[in-house]
Amino acid sequence: MNNLGLKLRERRKEKGLKLVDVSKLSGLHLSCVARIERGERFPTGRTLKKLVKPLGFSEIELFKLAGFLSSDKTNHDLLRMLTTREVAGLLNVHINTVRRWGNRGILKTYRIGSRGDRRFRREDIETFILGGVL
């Protein structure tokens, strides 16, 4: 079980909820919630947003637990630009979807190097995950 699954289970038990209760309140399938708690499935941003209300987390708190947002903005790792593949992994979408969103201006891209490789700022991706406008 991963740290996120453990925290979700602890919170669910603190609130006196059963898996079926969380499933009904969130609109997620029972097996989906159970697999997330056991660490067999890592939730997307959309799935996490559905778990916010039933479990009583703030959106930001839950995204930090999942590792989508960093609690330490001075971390050197945050200063580097993300590749298209890394963004696709964070958003749980196909790499071509990220490219298309970059081409259409949905995600802000930066072209670097002589080949013009796409890179993304972590702050822009965090804003996108939280549903903000870039």
Image (cartoon, rainbow, N blue to C red):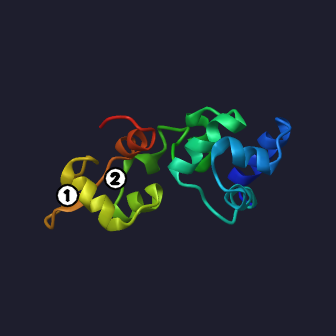
- Looking at the rendered structure, the kind of residue marked 2 is Met
Judging by the rendered image, the residue that carries numbered circle 1 is 112
Q: Residues within 10 Å of mark 1 (few under 14, many from 20)?
A: few
| Disc 1 to disc 2: CB gap under 8 Å | yes
65 or 45, nearer to the observer: 45
Q: Earlier in the sequence, mark 1 or mark 2?
A: 2
User: Mark 1 and mark 2: span between their CA atoms?
Assistant: 10 Å
Pinpoint residue 64: horizontal percent, then vertical percent: 58, 42
Q: Which mark is residue 33?
A: none
39 or 115, nearer to the observer: 39
- Give residue 117's quadrant in the image: bottom left
Q: Which quarter of the figure is the N terminus placed in?
A: bottom right
- For label 2, the SS is loop
How many badges with numbers are in the image?
2
- For label 1, the SS is strand
Judging by the rendered image, the residue that carries numbered circle 2 is 81
Compared across the picture, whether 75 is left or right of 42 comes to: left
Residue at horizontal 57 percent and vertical 50 percent from the top = 47
Pinpoint residue 78: horizontal percent, then vertical percent: 43, 47
